[in-house]
Amino acid sequence: MGWAGFNGGDPYTANIDSSMAVLNTNICAATSLLVWTWLDVIFFGKPSVIGAVQGMITGLVCITPGAGLVQGWAAVIMGILSGSVPWFTMMVVHKKWTLLQKVDDTLGVVHTHAVAGYLGGVLTGIFAEPTLCSLFLAVTHSRGGVYGGSGGVQVLKQLVGGAFIVGWNIVATSIICVAIGVVIPLRMSDEQLLIGDDAVHGEEAYALWGDGEKYDGTKHGLYSDDTGHGLSQASGATQVL
């Protein structure tokens, strides 16, 4: 819902451009989800909920640069590519490239956002439809590469623009991380990571005892339930039963 909102709201008006943006956002995301799921089934023998969500996210990221600028058929193509290219970089390239293996990227943001986002920017330069561009941009004669004219130049602009954003993010994020690192560590200790980041912050959804571990009031705290564990004498007017 949110993604349709900010893609559809980009033109700042209710027009064909905003309508196409909402439609293409759903088309690309759905196509990408299906392609990612198919690839999981083909190569791993079964679908995955996490894989389907990853495919949906890559589709949303990919279509964002051109949501209101491309036709529906182009959104389908972008969905096919956003469901396959990031899948390949995550499942194949990541496992073979030592540099990527050193990146602490639990959620796969490099693939679902960096790869899919750059891919979407380039594909927008290829598929941007002239009429839709004129509704969205004040720049005249804007068009994608498939529509001829100055479209080839637009692809080059998209490549350069994407490269600039990558460089900007590396520099800006590094500065922010260094500044934060002066105040607090950027990474938990290995001992804390073994406990789990959720547990360290007291955010466990379920506090389960280890296998074979007996209840210990000094470790697990006092509680009351039908089993009769943890009975204790309380001070004051209230007793814990």
Image (spheres, rainbow, N blue to C red):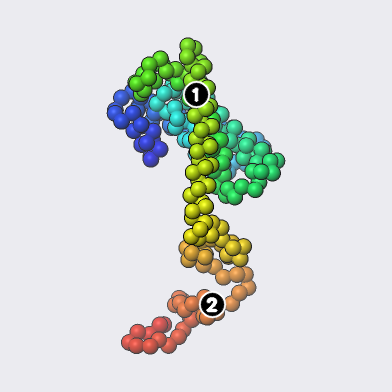
Residue 233 sits above or below residue 169 on the image: below
Mark yes or no: residue 78 visible.
Answer: no
Three-letter residue code for mark 1: Lys
For image coordinates 49% across by 24% down, the residue present is 157
Label for residue 219? 2
Disc 2, SS: helix
Task: Give the position of the C terminus as an image quadrant.
Answer: bottom left
Q: Is residue 107 above or below residue 229?
A: above
Q: Provide residue 39's location: percent of width, then percent of height.
A: 62, 35
**Residue at the (52%, 27%) spot, across then down:** 160
The front one of 229 and 208 is 208
Q: Position of residue 6 (x, y in %)?
A: 37, 36
The mark that comes first in sequence, 1 or 2, is: 1
Quarter of the N terminus within the rendering: top left
Instruction: Label 1, secondary structure: give it.
Output: helix
Q: CA distance from mark 1 to mark 2?
A: 61 Å
Read off the residue under disc 1.
157
Residue 152 visible to an observer of this rendering: yes
